[in-house]
Amino acid sequence: MFFSGLYKNKYDNQSYMKIFLKITFFALFLCSAANAQQRSSDLTGPYLGQKLPGMTPEPFTPEIFSQEREQHDLFFGPGGLEAVWTERNPADNTFRFLYTRSMDGIWSDPIVIPFSTTCRNMELCMSPDGRKLFFSSDRPASHGGEAQKMPDIWMSEKTVSGWGEPQCLLSPVNSPDIEVQPYAGFDGRLYFIRQSGKIRRIMCLMPVEGASADSVPFGVDLFEKQIAGFCVSPDERIIILHSRMEGGFGSWDLYISFRDSSGRWGDPVNPGQAFNTEGAEATVSFSPDGKYLFFERDRKIWWVDAKIIVRNRNK
């Protein structure tokens, strides 16, 4: 009945038919575009469809990574079926978090996590169970407030509709000092760096069954040098961080510490040219199964077979 009222005469019928066809074509175009936005990359297979690396670090550059922006802090969720990372726009020094997952074996195009475009959000980390995101931010402590002068550690939890509104963690994580660079360990602990004046210490949030959690310095005597970042292997026997310690190859270098059978952590060792160059290496993460390492080199993501660590240790 609706269309019958449009057809007044031959010429009107032709005119309205053209309009109808144009509207129909436009609607089909929008549907196609929406579908393409979800699946335009057609990346299949583990680790965003990239060829697995060997014992020499290689660039990790799936086509869904922006060519104009810098990539940092890449983390894969359980089974390697989802991923998050940080992108920085060098033109205006803004950051945003991106998320993608494998659906029916095909990786979706990344979406920008909405809350990440508000305020300055950095140093992203996904918990090993894929349920939480931790990051540092100068976000206002209350809605409508001003940005904080010193960053705190925030957390967002996954919901049925996406990532929830971030919550600022309370004591014993955040304090009047500066807290940055969170890392969620496979043992359920939360590691982060606390800076008081010029002193930077790695802290460890240790949940204790039946008691309140507490943050304690982690290896104070071992790591009181100029350090940043912190990564613990799934088997909790290897620590990787980046530092500007003397004797490095360039700007920031990666350093590795091994835990012996007695539980003691060894001095951080520079693995040499196996990892480090004259540029800057930083922000390391392990794949969920511990087989691969992802790290930042000159503001792009690289990866390598994690066996390189053992080979380097035995030299």
Image: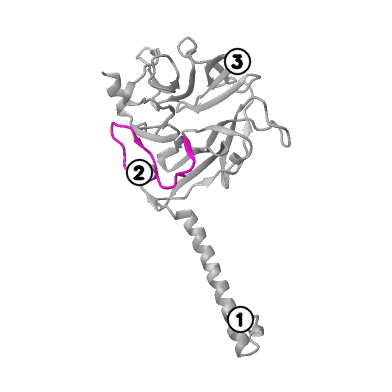
Q: Residues within 10 Å of mark 1 (few under 14, many from 20)?
A: some
Left or right of 308, for residue 177: right
Residue drawn at the location 63% of the way across and 81% of the way down: 3
Name the residue beneath numbered marker 2: 50
Q: Is residue 180 above or below residue 26?
A: above
Cα distance between the residues tagged 1 and 3 = 72 Å
* Mark 2 or 3, nearer chain start: 2
What's the residue type where badge 3 is placed?
A: Ser
Give the magenta part as a residue range. 48-73
Q: Is residue 83 above or below residue 11?
A: above
Dots 2 and 3: beta carbons under 8 Å?
Answer: no
Residue 67: say if magenta.
yes
SS at mark 2 in the image: loop
Three-letter code, disc 2: Gln
Dividing the picture into quadrants, the one containing residue 263 is top left
Give me the residue at 45% from left, 12% from top: 222
Which quarter of the rendering shows the C terminus? top left
Q: Residue furthest bottom?
A: 10
Picture disc at residue 196: 3
